[in-house]
Image (cartoon, rainbow, N blue to C red):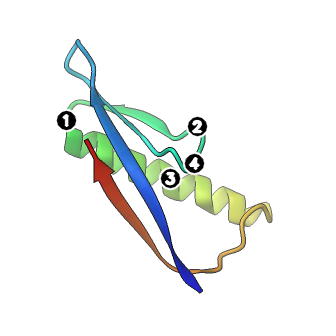
Amino acid sequence: MSDMQLTIRLLREVDGRWIADVPELPGVTVYGVSPEYATMKAKALSLRVIAEDIEHGELLPATDSLQFSVAA
């Protein structure tokens, strides 16, 4: 078993909103009013995507832990 490493990339839009995406999970991109809120939403969506993949047999739950790192 191993750890699953996911990276949350943050970018600030010109209108002040924050975008957070997870490159390892295509389609996981969210907006937030702060970097903390965008990070929280990215983690939540990532967990939902991983759960769906496991449920549909597309990803085997072969990891001991899931770790996020934030890259601004």
Amino acid type shown at disc 3: Ser
Considering the image in quadrants, where does the C terminus appear? top left
| Residue 27: numbered disc | 2
Amino acid type shown at disc 2: Gly
Badge 1 local density, few (<14 within 10 Å), some, or many (20+)? Answer: some
N-term mark: 3 or 2:
2
Q: Are marks 4 and 2 in contact (CB under 8 Å)?
A: yes
Q: Quadrant of residue 21?
A: top left
N-term mark: 4 or 3:
4
- The location of residue 56, given as percent across then percent down, is 79, 60
Question: Which mark's residue is nearer the viewer, 4 or 3?
Answer: 4
- The location of residue 48, given as percent across then percent down, is 55, 55
In front: 28, or 5? 5
- What residue did someone put label 4 on? 25
Against 22, residue 5 (above or below) is: below
- What residue did someone put label 1 on? 34
Q: CA distance from mark 4 to mark 3?
A: 7 Å
Residue under the image location 60 percent in, 41 percent down: 26
